[in-house]
């Protein structure tokens, strides 16, 4: 409403858009709006209405959300009492409880690097020593136990308390491989598998077997002893020409077609990530560039496979459960898809893009393919490296970023962190987050910083 000029002795009528001279009530008609009594009455009513609006505005500003509701555990409990349970209470509590538990230094006079740890695998199944084992690469594959003190703090100097092979100093040099692209461990065959991005006409994979410890010897030794499991699958290898399966008897075969008709383009190029579906080891999900994920089954012909199209190139695939899968990609894309309810989103730039079940709006990675990410199913937490050299924790139940005072301080000046993994120490109940920052493997566990804090 436009403001009108107030003229003494005159009344402005909003409906008729004109001024009337205020007249005494004893001479003006009884229902005249310009009578002095009616003008005074309306002025008082307008003043009271203005006061009421100001009072409501002040009261509204005084009503704020209680800060206690933002606390992971106490706030989650109160939300349940209010009838609004939060799905990520357990995840938020676990993230808040992760504390820095030291680091394993890989750099010494023999190994050095100007970048972050490029590839890393942590194994936690050596119950003879109750320690995790790290296989990482700094131009070659090196291995080291990850020892802890009574407070659960990691430090390499603690290896002096353990019996190690003569004339060997951790970390150990295991294998020289050019242009390492990934490191994994296959428990049933007790083999560490290493792949390379070095150009080759054939798919090349390196494997070495750590020595097995004597089951009757309970002393800590620099040897590995894992319990075998029943499995026929060794691994699946993603290449720039498709996917290769390797089964336990040494047989290797292309999962994807090796050749296509002259005018048909091979769609299975640049495979950046693979993961077997939870509870279904015969179902393999893989994808990369362009942004498509195939849900394959080696028992079916390739033209029967399902396809999930994302809106950008895929960098990571993690199976959450039997039906849901976590897909990370370029252009800040991190989403959960339900394989049962795939639906095209109208108006999407990619006509075949599937509609995600959940998105992570605070994930940041615009252009990096080699960037770290891992998912822990027990806590529902996604640990993801961001392009600014930091690491963030996200809830797979809500998509929100979770606060973690120690993890939030991680920062590498060498660029995006490439190695992130959850692994559980032998006899521990909760997983430890391992981060390959610079030339270190940092550990973050749920607990307290020192034994005095437990009081």
Image: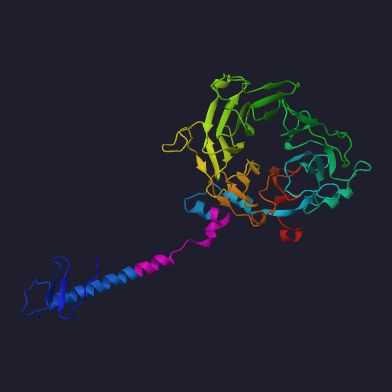
* Residue 228 in sight: no
Residue 39 placed where, x, y %?
Answer: 16, 75
| Residue farthest toward the front in the current orientation of the protein | 262
Residue 76 placed where, x, y %?
Answer: 54, 53
Residue 371 placed where, x, y %?
Answer: 65, 44
Q: Which residues are magenta?
A: 55-76
Could you say which is closer to the camera, residue 203 or residue 262?
262
Q: Is residue 337 depicted above or below 29 in this figure?
A: above
Is residue 313 rendered magenta in the image? Answer: no
Residue 58 placed where, x, y %?
Answer: 39, 69
Tell me the quadrant of the picture where the N terminus can be found: bottom left
Instruction: Give left or right: position of 421 versus 1.
Output: right
- What is the count of numbered marks? 0
- Residue 408 picture quarter: bottom right
Tell me the quadrant of the picture where the C terminus can be found: bottom right
* Residue 95 in sight: yes
Could you say which is closer to the camera, residue 273 or residue 452?
273
Q: Is residue 217 depicted above or below 16 in this figure?
A: above
- Residue 450 picture quarter: bottom right
**Which residue is drawn at the image coordinates 55% and 46% (left, top)?**
332
Instruction: Give left or right: position of 88 versus 195.
Output: left
């Amino acid at each position: 409403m436009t403001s009108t000029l107030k003229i003494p002795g005159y009344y402005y009528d909003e409906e008729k858009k004109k001024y009337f001279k205020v007249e005494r009530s004893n001479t003006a008609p009884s229902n005249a709006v310009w009578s002095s009594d009616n003008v005074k009455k309306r002025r008082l009513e307008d003043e009271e209405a203005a006061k009421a609006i100001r009072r409501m505005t002040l009261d509204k500003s005084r009503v704020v959300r209680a800060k206690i509701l933002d606390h992971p555990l106490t706030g989650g409990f109160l939300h349940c009492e209010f009838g609004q349970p939060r799905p990520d209470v357990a995840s938020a509590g676990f993230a808040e409880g992760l504390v820095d538990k030291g680091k394993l230094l890989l750099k010494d006079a023999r190994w050095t690097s100007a970048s972050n740890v490029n590839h890393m695998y942590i194994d936690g199944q050596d119950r003879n020593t109750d320690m995790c084992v790290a296989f990482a690469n700094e131009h070659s594959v090196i291995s080291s136990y990850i020892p802890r003190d009574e407070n659960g703090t990691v430090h390499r100097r603690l290896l002096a308390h353990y019996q190690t092979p003569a004339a060997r100093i951790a970390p150990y040099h295991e294998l020289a491989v050019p242009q390492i692209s990934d490191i994994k461990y296959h428990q049933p065959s007790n083999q560490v598998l290493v792949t390379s991005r070095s150009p080759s006409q054939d798919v090349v994979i390196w494997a070495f077997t750590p020595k097995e410890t004597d089951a009757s010897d309970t002393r800590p030794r620099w040897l590995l002893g894992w319990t075998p499991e029943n499995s026929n699958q060794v691994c699946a290898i993603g290449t720039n020409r498709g996917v290769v399966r390797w089964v336990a008897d040494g047989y290797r075969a292309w999962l994807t077609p090796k050749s296509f008709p002259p005018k048909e383009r091979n769609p299975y190029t640049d495979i950046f990530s693979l993961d077997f579906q939870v509870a279904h080891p015969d179902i393999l999900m893989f994808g990369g560039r362009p942004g498509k994920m195939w849900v394959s089954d080696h028992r079916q012909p390739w033209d029967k496979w399902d396809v999930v199209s994302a809106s950008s190139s895929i960098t990571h695939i993690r199976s959450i459960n039997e039906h849901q899968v976590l897909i990370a990609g370029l252009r800040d894309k991190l989403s959960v898809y339900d394989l049962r309810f795939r639906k095209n989103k109208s108006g999407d730039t990619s006509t075949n893009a599937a509609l995600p079940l959940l998105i992570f709006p605070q994930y940041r990675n615009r252009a990096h393919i080699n960037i770290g990410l891992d998912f822990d199913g027990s806590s529902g937490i996604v640990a993801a490296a961001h392009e600014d050299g930091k690491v963030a924790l996200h809830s797979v139940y809500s998509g929100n970023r979770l606060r973690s005072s120690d993890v939030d301080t991680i920062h590498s000046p060498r660029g995006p962190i490439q190695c992130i993994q959850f692994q559980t120490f032998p006899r521990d109940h909760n997983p430890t987050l391992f981060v390959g920052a610079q030339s270190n493997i940092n550990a973050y566990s749920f607990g307290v910083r020192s034994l005095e804090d437990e009081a």
